Amino acid sequence: MALFKRRTVGKPGEWFYCLEHRTVEEGPQCRAADRLGPYGTREEARHAMETARERNEEWETDPKWHDDPDRGKSGGA
């Protein structure tokens, strides 16, 4: 049994989005596997899921990152 609770690393003024609680947190309050960030502002953290979706879409449709040139095109064979 640990005598001391291990602190989460972070700096005041950093904002995170907790995936488990679906909330914005100042400083890391939940474990790293359950959060996105850090973000510079509360507003950026609030839009974390939207930002992640946009970045995923960009990556999925970026031809530099795929060997199959037909990947991501609709109406395929």
Image: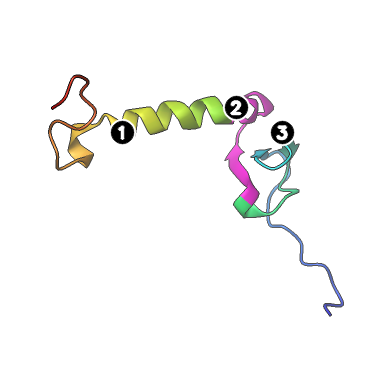
Of the numbered discs 3 and 2, the one sitting upstream in the chain is 3
In this view, the mark in front (2 or 1): 1
Of the numbered discs 3 and 1, the one sitting upstream in the chain is 3
> Which residue type does callout 1 highlight?
Glu
* Residue 41 image point, x, y percent: 64, 29
Q: Is residue 2 above or below residue 11?
A: below
Pick the front one: 41 or 52:
52
Q: Do the residues labelled 3 and 2 touch (CB within 8 Å)?
A: no
Q: Name the residue under label 1.
A: 60
Question: Which residue is farthest bottom?
Answer: 1
Region in magenta: 34-48
Q: Residues within 10 Å of mark 2 (few under 14, many from 20)?
A: some
Q: In which quarter of the image is residue 39?
A: top right
Q: Which mark is residue 44?
A: 2
Q: Do the residues labelled 3 and 1 touch (CB within 8 Å)?
A: no
> Which residue type does callout 2 highlight?
Glu
Q: Residue 24 carries which label?
A: 3
- Callout 3 secondary element: strand
